[in-house]
Image: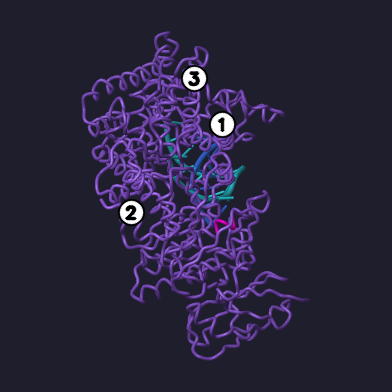
Chain colours: A purple, B cyan, C blue
Amino acid sequence: MDVSELIDGLNEKQREAVAAPLQNMLVLAGAGSGKTRVLVHRIAWLMQVEHASAYSIFAVTFTNKAAKEMRTRVEETLRSPVGGMWIGTFHGLSHRILRAHHREANLPEAFQILDTDDQVRMIRRLLKAMNIDEKKWPPKQIAWYISARKDEGQRPRDIQAYDVNEQLLLRVYTAYQDACDRAGLVDFAEILLRCYELLQQQPTLLRHYQQRFRHMLVDEFQDTNSIQYRWLKLLAGQDNTMMIVGDDDQSIYGWRGAKIENIKRFLEDFSAETIRLEQNYRSTATILKASNALIQNNAERMGKSLWTDGNQGEPISIYAAFNELDEARFVVSKIRTWLNGGNALQDCAILYRNNAQSRVLEEAMLQEGLKYRIYGGMRFFERQEIKDALAYLRLISNRQDDAAFERVINTPARGIGDKTLSHIRDCARNESMPLWYAAKAVIEQNHLAGRAATAVSRFIELVEQLDDKITELELSEQAKTTIEQSGLMAMYQAEKGEKGRARVENLEELISACGQYEPPIDEDFSSPLQGFLAYTSLESGEGQADEHEDAVQMMTLHSAKGLEFPLVFMVGVEEGMFPSQQSHEESGRLEEERRLCYVGMTRAMEKLYISHAESRRLYGQEKHHSPSRFLRELPEECVEEIRIKTQVSRPVNSGRFSASVTHAAFEDSGYNLGQRVLHAKFGAGTVLNYEGSGAQSRIQVNFDDVGTKWLVTAYARLQSF
DNA sequence: ACCATCTTGTTTTTT
DNA sequence: ACAAGATGGT
């Protein structure tokens, strides 16, 4: 392959990064500046020009999707499959190292991964045993605390508890860690921390990996947390070179421990060179200008300004909706227009700050008959029925797995109630043994009443028989047998309604997922089942069906990162929503919200609509929000306001006053009121509803007299009296 | 064990 | 508003 192919078609800065000498480098890559391209070409360059072996390359991403894309594109570029190259997520790669050296890491061969839900359940059980009030100490918050400590690389012994509260948290952390260790369970944060400690404590092992991974590449570096940074630094050692790619302006995960300052730390710790990618190939000049202006309001920046040699494009349209229904109606009508212009549905996206906002939009889309797809939400492998089935499989592969035991001991109901269970739990605690063995012991010691004893023995027998029966089977047969014989299938078949039917389907889907699963060739699992179980925990299970269906894409601003769409709607851009209420309180959060806004805006390629509602039903209550401060930060020449202006001309106390409504606004917002400027006197018109008083009063007026059926809800803001 | 009624808490998400 | 979890009664 001709080397020039690798740099042809790249701009100067991209080329500089791809063809850089072997040194530590920071590529500050703005939105839409072609960072993945640079990473992929850099890998190819290393192999073609620097003659690096695939074995010496180590590339880290945050999501499986990104890892997969990188691998595919590297293989496309090199026009051959590459084996032996490590490309994966922080968790995936750490997990791989732990599997390979589970003994040195003090983990059983069949160790399993706890997801957030398992983690919370585990903590809830511990709190009960420790007699701690769940009300005062929500398990979720404790799980959060523990993960945060692990993200900082802190074990219980590293923590100074200064007050009673922290002492309690520390006690739970200790108990939790104990329970996990005994059960052979690791949570997500543990995977990273355990791997870090393993490498730190095993110099031979560390040297082995350091000597292997000469070329390290890291994507989305602004999202790394403390332990990830330390892990990378450890692996890099003195001799390896690392290219990190990131954008401080797109750091939106500070709330879960990401340290934006890791970029600056990297520059110092690794004496790295910086290359800026500022040419944007995605958005119109207008969108970029507005985005640049917005982000300039943040104080702590490395500095970067996106530019394009493309078109100016249309101005950003800002729509002031009366309420969230009006906002949804606006979005839908604009999508309709877009569609009529011969464009595709899948090319537009609606972005919102929180998931609850999707509801009204969904309803509007449904009403208008527009297909949509919502990102996020419940993942396949996190569904109740799937987790039940997986728990059986986990218990079969590792009897110590207390989390799995707790989950399935009485699912489906087999007459093992709370009393029997607490008996088993007590025994397990006193003897410090896994629940499984405690259950056996309790039976042997005849501590249980007849009926309970039979139930427990039947359960033990079931699991042991399944274990025997399935070892020789194919993975999908293993799953099938387990799901059927455990009684799970029957239980969900008996469940009535749409829900039950869906669950049965999901269980079948799980069996078929087992059939399609191919164990990774270069990773060593003791059995296909082991591999599959790890896969279910580390991969969200998305990315199959209806991905390519032509539908409007709806998602939160967070999940939009990395994506692009010709037409983008950002909705609910109001004070209190975005920036969110709570971001006001903590320091630094406001800048993160602004970055989130920047991320949202830079998703748009051709046209961007931003809307805010003057009133919105939130948690059952009517809230009035002013437009987001972010809107004021956009240069006037980049935006165009669409709004129905209401002006109050008389006191409202009487319930009769007039407002004027301009025609242009009506037409732009989808209302068609003809060619003339309309002066509607609310007092004289048909007032359908009137509520509130003072500065924020609501009037609903029917505009029947102009020949439309639109019901307009107007909010009158009174300046004086 | 199971159902009806209540209380409660609601940013963002990946692994 | 609304859903999930807790509580309490049969």
Look at 27% across and 34% down and name the residue there. A521
x%, y% of residue A28? 51, 53
When the figure is inspected, residue A386 is found, relative to residue A574, above or below; the finding is: above
x%, y% of residue A235? 46, 32
Spot the residue most to the bottom.
A676
Residues indicated by labels 1 and 2 sit on the same polypeptide chain: yes
Q: Check the residue under mark 1 and report the chain it is in.
A: A
Left or right: A663, with A450 as reference point: right
Q: Check the residue under mark 3 and report the chain it is in.
A: A
Residue span colored magenta: A593-597
Magenta highlight: main SS: helix
When the figure is inspected, residue A567 is found, relative to residue A706, above or below; the finding is: above
How many C-alpha atoms fall within 10 Å of the one at disc 3: few (<14), some, or many (≥20)? many
**Type of amino acid at the residue the image marks with label 2:** Leu
The numbered mark at residue A6 is: 2
Q: Earlier in the sequence, mark 3 or mark 1?
A: 1
x%, y% of residue A445? 43, 8
**Type of amino acid at the residue the image marks with label 1:** Gly
Secondary element at image label 1: loop
In terms of depth relative to the viewer, which is nearer, A284 or A332?
Answer: A284
In terms of depth relative to the viewer, which is nearer, A231 or A108?
Answer: A231
Instruction: Write down the residue under mark 3.
Output: A425
**Type of amino acid at the residue the image marks with label 3:** Arg
In terms of depth relative to the viewer, which is nearer, A480 or A690?
Answer: A480
Residues at marks 1 and 2, CA–CA distance in whole angstroms: 40 Å
Instruction: Write down the residue under mark 1.
Output: A153
Left or right: A22, with B5 as reference point: left
Residues indicated by labels 3 and 1 sit on the same polypeptide chain: yes
When the figure is inspected, residue A253 is found, relative to residue A336, above or below; the finding is: above
Spot the residue most to the top.
A445
**Magenta residue check for A594:** yes
